[in-house]
Amino acid sequence: MKKLILLLFTIATTTNLFSQKTFASTDPNYKIHVEAGEAALIAEQYDDCLVAYESAFKIKQTSVLSTLRAAACAYSGDNKPMLEIYLNKAFDLNWDQAKGIFKNYTEFAYLQESDFAKTIDSRWEKAAKASGIDMELMAEFKEIQRTDQEQRGYMREIQDKYGWDSPQMDSLWKIQTAADEANLARIEEVIAEHGYPGKSLVGASNMGTAFLVIQHSNQEAQEKYLPVLKKAADDGEVRWSSVALLIDRVLLGQDKKQTYGSQVNSDKETGEYFFSPIENPFQIDSIRNTVGLGPLQNYADNWEFQWDPAKHVARHKK
């Protein structure tokens, strides 16, 4: 059966189809410096890049991405002392995320066959082994994540081109449904053996994999494992921002209104995107903030429609 709600999910270590630009600090000078650093990296002005990031990091340094960009500038500018400092910092911040960011952000493409890439790989492997995670299970989860996302990655384009009820969409769903069923069976085995397979078992880049599979499963499985996911979020094994999406989907499956506004639908006649019913539309941004989600308009921008709470209420009164 086709899913009624069209929503694509990605994980932090992949290039996010629905990413929004956020910054580690709200200080406007921080934003100025990191944007200057990124621009200098792309322009191959490596000394200027290092100066910009040095200024930014005097304000705050919690971003793995910005720290890796600074490391790339140091490597490309042959500044070995700063290269070592920034690589150490990036892996201290989040060793698992560091490799995923390096592999998936386009500004690092020119370094993928370099000694810099070999250093990233060796540091990642060393950190992974030292962390005590299950390396074999982590590799398996990467494949599960790939199959969970593979056909979904085409659905927005196919829907816009051929329509939701087209043979092309039917073909995608047949392939994806088979993968979803196999993935859920495996995730259930792992949960039965280990509990929720989160950050400490499969690493930060895979802690959302089981969530994705459950999110894309049937209502019965979603309701069954929602308490498991809530506990995992409380324990720091998965992000609360991820669990919020499952909460919304479960609520809608129970014919209730969603809490966090994560579920988007489309009008079959006009193709217009809109949010499925929201419990408190006029307070939604503050509610989303409690679980680390940004303003709802930023989310709506991914589908290029305007969030208007009054219009939302009127639509769902009809």
Image: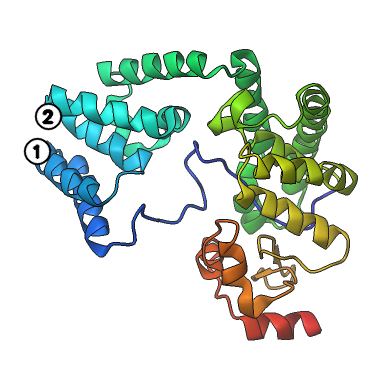
Q: Is residue 255 above or below residue 162?
A: below
Question: Which residue is depicted at the point 64% across and 38% down?
Answer: 149
Question: Which residue is depicted at the point 25% across and 56% down?
Answer: 30
Left or right, 60 with reference to 169: left
Kindly indicate whether the residue at mark 1 contacts the one at mark 2 (C-beta within 8 angstroms): yes
Q: Residues within 10 Å of mark 1 (few under 14, many from 20)?
A: some
Q: Position of residue 154 (x, y in %)?
A: 62, 44
Q: Position of residue 314 (x, y in %)?
A: 72, 86
- The local secondary structure at tag 1 comes to helix
Instruction: Give the image quarter of residue 125.
Output: top left
Question: Which residue is depicted at the point 66% across and 70% down?
Answer: 274
Furthest toward the left, the residue is: 47
The type of residue carrying mark 1 is Asp
Q: Position of residue 128 (x, y in %)?
A: 49, 18
> Could you tell me if residue 43 is visible in this image?
no
Left or right, 86 with reference to 194: left
Look at mark 1 in the image and give the residue it sits on. Answer: 47
Q: Is residue 7 above or below residue 112?
A: below
- The local secondary structure at tag 2 comes to loop
Q: Is residue 15 above or below residue 287?
A: above
Q: Position of residue 187 (x, y in %)?
A: 77, 28
Left or right, 301 with reference to 273: left
**Residue in the foreground of this view, choosing between 60 and 103:** 60
Disc number placed over residue 77 in the picture, else none: 2
Rendered-image quadrant of the C terminus: bottom right
Furthest toward the front, the residue is: 235
